[in-house]
Image (cartoon, coloured by chain):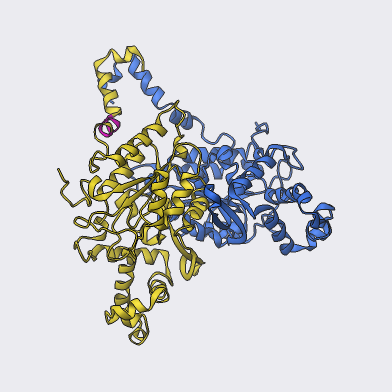
Chain colours: A yellow, B blue
Amino acid sequence: MSDIMLARPAVRWFWLFLFWPLWLQAAEPLPAWNDGLSKTAIVEFVQAVTTDGTKDFVKPAERIAVFDNDGTLRSEQPMYFQMLFALEEVHRLAPQHPEWKQQQPFKAVLDNDQKTLADSGMDGLLKIIGATHTQVSTQAFLTNVRAWLAKAVHPKTHKPYTEMVYQPMLELLTYLRANGFKTYIVSGGEVEFMRAWTEEVYGIPPEQVIGTTFTGEYQYNDGKPVIMRMPKLAHNDDGPGKPVSIDAVIGRRPIMAFGNSDGDLQMLQWTASGDGKRFMGLVHHTDAQREWAYDRNSKIGKLDKALDQAAAQNWTVVDMAKEWRQIYPFDTPAP
Amino acid sequence: MSDIMLARPAVRWFWLFLFWPLWLQAAEPLPAWNDGLSKTAIVEFVQAVTTDGTKDFVKPAERIAVFDNDGTLRSEQPMYFQMLFALEEVHRLAPQHPEWKQQQPFKAVLDNDQKTLADSGMDGLLKIIGATHTQVSTQAFLTNVRAWLAKAVHPKTHKPYTEMVYQPMLELLTYLRANGFKTYIVSGGEVEFMRAWTEEVYGIPPEQVIGTTFTGEYQYNDGKPVIMRMPKLAHNDDGPGKPVSIDAVIGRRPIMAFGNSDGDLQMLQWTASGDGKRFMGLVHHTDAQREWAYDRNSKIGKLDKALDQAAAQNWTVVDMAKEWRQIYPFDTPAP
């Protein structure tokens, strides 16, 4: 900007207005994070890769940040919310399936028979997911998910599931996008189950949501075509499936990755192994009081090998109890 | 802007500078297109969906435009360029495969025996694609494609393949992006074969390129992980595969789609069947002099059913000979 322009008071105000959002951001990034190792590491990383003319600078087009969803951006206890949805859908759909009264694992769900349900194992789980997530068009499935979200509440907090997201991570997503990053979800969750709400809740549009997918089938349907969800897994987006889907869908290696479990290990390894400055982060669930505390021995979100590799390679491990002033948006921040 | 600011000459210049790109665009959109039905339809569509406060307005986040690649954004004769790459790769890789001297269809490629090659049919084609496109990491494959592009020339024009793109379509992509559209490629071509050059040539980043994919396998490789391309098709992005991949990867229905063959029919139907204003376009190869002329009886890029449906439903059919002042960037525009 020229000296001539700066000399005029009205024009000076105009510039202030132009940079208002940046100025606000600079004032207080990540307010729900306590000053600590993780916040410092995040801010230093972002400043390094966004400062033009330095060796660590990364062009905006290559600023890809990937986030696991369950346990990283929101809670995943007492079980994955998608599974809670599936169980409630079995109840809702039961009148259309009188045979379920005699058929396992559906009978166990309808009878609220936890033991038989647990005994049905992975095979039973897949039957329930298949019956509630497929043989329906994408559009109809999105409608089902949204109808559930509108009334379902979490068994512990009694809050809608869309509010069980982590305030510090919402701030991190916003902070990254304000710094030219493209934020992606890369989750073991089914992709459309997430797309039903991720844009509204995280500001992440459908095309930046990667997840487990079922095979789709195009049906012309007399000029009203639909994509039918077939009961056949197309991609299991967990563990080694994560770098594979990142490669297939994004086609660039991320420079930042955040997870919380061993299912995220390969995504973090893949991110770590690129050239230049990198950020690998793990959310460590250490807060039994405000959220949950679990890691190496948990059935949901087991964090064991990834915790070892994080220690060995100096990845950032966020101690939720110590580093987060606030867990959920509805919480009052700690002083 | 206020009267006070307009009253100062320096400030008036500042505003002109700010709107310079828009002003240029307004002056002459799509210069390589003759004024005609197609150009008019495109400009009217874009103005309709981008004019806020009208019934046809579409939010920028939902302005998704999808383009087939071969025959729509660039030439596809005398055969798909990817196939020409595969044949040349067989020659390059032959010293590492002495068995190919006795093994069909490789022997036919090495002997330049067109008849035997043609007789090997789809089975032979898949063997050649498998041998040249898989059992290699994504990164190494990209290197192979770029090395080929750097020296290969088209058999008819003797120009690099990256220059065999249509100037009118390059302008259309730019025009759409200037109007807030997100432009995607949705092609039967293999996705990494395209990503090797689409950002540079079309301004379309890797994450907006959708195509046929092979199954990927994550290999840890002693801390230097790679994604290996396995000789197993994951998705065939042709015909009904196109709306399926659009649904899986983008998760939104496009409002604009452009193709040139029956392999694009379902993508156009899918685009057409959404709510609100829509644009469906076909490039019709009518220019035997400057490019090629083919449609209903062509082996490559057969355009038959889609041409009928375009006529029945008033989709835009671009008569290349009449409507394009210029085909390639290296051509001199017609007066």
Q: Is residue A23 magenta?
A: yes
Q: Observer-nearest residue: A36 or A185?
A: A36
Where residue A139 sits: x, y (%)?
39, 63
Q: Residue at 33% across / 78% down in the picture? A: A117
A78 is higher (above) or lower (below) than B114 = below
* Residue A189 picture quarter: bottom left
Question: Is residue B313 in sight in this rendering?
Answer: no
Query: Which residue is nearer to you in this view: A268 or B181?
Result: A268
Q: Main secondary structure of the magenta part?
A: helix
Q: Give the range drawn in magenta.
A: A20-25
- Above-or-below relation of A47 to B51: above
Q: What x and y, as percent, mark residue A55?
A: 47, 29
Against A296, is A110 above or below? below
**Residue positioned 45% across, 51% down in the render:** A267
Q: Which quarter of the rendering shows the N terminus of chain A? A: top left
Q: Eyeballing the image, is B200 above or below A239?
A: above
Quadrant of the image occupied by residue A161 = bottom left
Residue nearest the viewer, comparing B41 with B19: B19
Can residue A329 be seen in this snapshot?
Answer: yes
**In the displayed structure image, the side of residue B24 where residue A87 appears, left or right:** left
The answer to whether B133 appears left or right of A141 in the picture is: right
Looking at the picture, tell me which residue is in the foreground, A112 or A195: A112
Q: Which percent across, then down, holds residue A197?
A: 32, 56
Give the image location of residue A331, x and y in percent. 17, 51
Whether residue B205 appears in magenta in the rendering, the answer is no
Q: Is residue B90 left or right of residue B66?
A: right
> Quarter of the image containing the C terminus of chain A?
top left
